[in-house]
Image (cartoon, grey):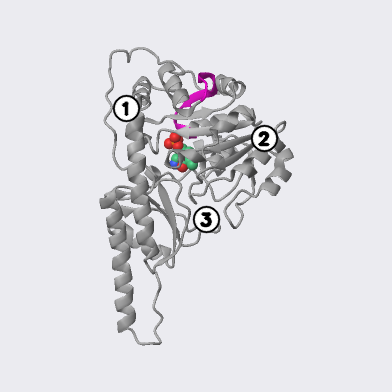
């Protein structure tokens, strides 16, 4: 008997999330997972590894509450924001009955978590100006329990408009929870909607230490919400979700010194991003540069496959989005430090130069591929 037959139907049918580490690939410049380029150096003490950790380590919860400007009873710490997404679905959606709403193209784990939980998915694609389709979402509210919005949106880099969000929160007040995923908000902190938590008990904000805090390896994320929502999620979360070394490192990252380090990193990366964007605008192989509010830039090329292959050959791993609806020929580039950005630009300039020399030597009738 095949053991696979014993698995749940949804699991047998599932295509797992193609995470950067799962896809793998050989290269020395990793720009495919929106990670920070360098690890911060925090230390861990090993005098209590014999004990189970606190379920919700107070230092981490208090530290994040102070940083985010909310009360401690509005914070839940989890294994990355990914666990927060799944907890929300498991807490609020009945398997085989309820649905979530997503606005593709967006972060893939909302749909995958829903699928693994046997929860349906309503898709309302982003509009042509890459905003949530507010009227369509409002019309679908009676069919969904959770609406997932991502701001800045991965992979397009756009912010969700505040007025539209407020109107949606009003409309959904008694029927649905609106989740705003702020995984990248440190790169544009003024755009956070955390202040709206005071007005809307149906708003949930998810955050992470994986991006601006440069701690993707420790797996630490946060849910910010009304105390009522946090209490419900706390019923569902695993008994000991946060390993003690993770709590120790997260607590250090949330001290004033840790926050200052993070902010300096954000300033640096935002400068690199602006420089990358300026350089990209001068390259003939670039067709469109998407919004840049996160630590990444999605770029539509004339020939995305050729760019991707050339990067790979040069040891640079990027994330290909060309098979996503509306994102043909598009590749997402994580913003790293200058040497990494220089390496990316060198490949693009070399490709441009090669194409031009090919077009100069070709006869007029031969088709010349554009990048
Ligand atoms: N939300 C978005 C938009 C993301 O891009 C990611 C990670 N790529 C996550 C959530 C998950 O973050 P974490 O590492 O905290 O699980």
- Residue drawn at x 39%, y 67% is 285
- Does the CB distance between marks 1 and 2 fall below 8 Å? no
Q: Dot 2 surroundings within 10 Å: few (below 14), some, or many (20 or more)?
A: some
Q: Residue furthest bottom?
A: 364
Closer to the camera in the image, 30 or 186: 186
Residue 257: mark: 1
Residue 324: mark: 3
Rounded to the nearest whole Å, what is the CA distance between mark 1 and mark 2? Answer: 40 Å
The tag earlier along the polypeptide, 1 or 2, is 2
The tag earlier along the polypeptide, 2 or 3, is 2
The x and y percentages for residue 366 are 39, 84
Q: Dot 3 surroundings within 10 Å: few (below 14), some, or many (20 or more)?
A: few
- The answer to whether one can see residue 28 in this image is yes
Rounded to the nearest whole Å, what is the CA distance between mark 2 and mark 3? Answer: 25 Å
What is the secondary structure assignment of the residue under circle 1?
helix
Please indicate whether residue 201 sits to the left or right of residue 78 in the image: right
Q: How many marks?
A: 3
Q: Dot 1 surroundings within 10 Å: few (below 14), some, or many (20 or more)?
A: few
Please indicate whether residue 176 sits to the left or right of residue 82 in the image: right
The x and y percentages for residue 128 are 60, 58
Residue 145: mark: 2
The tag earlier along the polypeptide, 1 or 3, is 1
Whether label 3 lies within 8 Å of ligand 1 gets the answer: no
- Magenta segment: 70-82
């Amino acid at each position: 008997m095949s053991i696979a037959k014993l698995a749940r139907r949804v699991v047998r049918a599932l295509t797992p999330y193609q995470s950067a580490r799962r896809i793998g690939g050989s290269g020395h410049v990793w720009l495919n997972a929106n990670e920070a380029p360098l690890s911060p150096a925090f230390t861990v003490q090993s005098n209590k590894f014999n004990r189970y950790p606190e379920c919700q380590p107070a230092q981490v919860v208090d530290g994040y509450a102070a940083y985010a400007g909310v009360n401690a009873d509005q914070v839940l710490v989890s294994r990355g924001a990914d666990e927060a997404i799944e907890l929300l679905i498991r807490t609020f959606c009945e398997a085989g009955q309820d649905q979530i709403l997503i606005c593709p193209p967006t972060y893939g784990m909302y749909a995958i978590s829903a699928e693994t939980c046997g929860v349906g998915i309503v898709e309302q694609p982003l509009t042509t100006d890459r905003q949530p389709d507010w009227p369509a979402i409002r019309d679908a509210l009676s069919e969904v329990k959770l609406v997932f919005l991502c701001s800045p949106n991965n992979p397009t880099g756009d912010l969700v408009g505040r007025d539209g969000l407020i109107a949606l929160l009003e409309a959904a007040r008694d029927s649905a929870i609106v989740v705003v995923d702020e995984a990248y908000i440190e790169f544009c902190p003024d755009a956070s909607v955390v202040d709206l938590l005071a007005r809307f008990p149906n708003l949930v904000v998810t955050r992470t230490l994986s991006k601006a805090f440069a701690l993707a390896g420790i797996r630490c994320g946060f849910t910010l919400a009304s105390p009522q929502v946090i209490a419900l999620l706390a019923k569902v979360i695993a008994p000991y979700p946060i390993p003690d070394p993770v709590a120790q490192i997260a607590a250090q990252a949330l001290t004033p010194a840790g926050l200052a380090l993070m902010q300096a990193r954000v300033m640096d990366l935002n400068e690199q991003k602006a420089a990358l964007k300026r350089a990209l605008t001068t390259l003939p192989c670039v067709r469109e540069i998407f919004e840049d509010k996160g630590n990444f830039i999605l770029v539509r090329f004339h020939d995305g496959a050729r760019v991707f292959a050339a990067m790979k050959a040069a040891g640079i791993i990027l994330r290909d989005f060309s098979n996503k609806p509306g994102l043909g020929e598009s590749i997402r580039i994580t913003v790293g430090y200058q040497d990494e950005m220089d390496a990316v630009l060198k490949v693009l300039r070399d490709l441009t130069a090669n194409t031009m020399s090919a077009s100069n030597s070709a006869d007029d009738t031969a088709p010349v591929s554009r990048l």
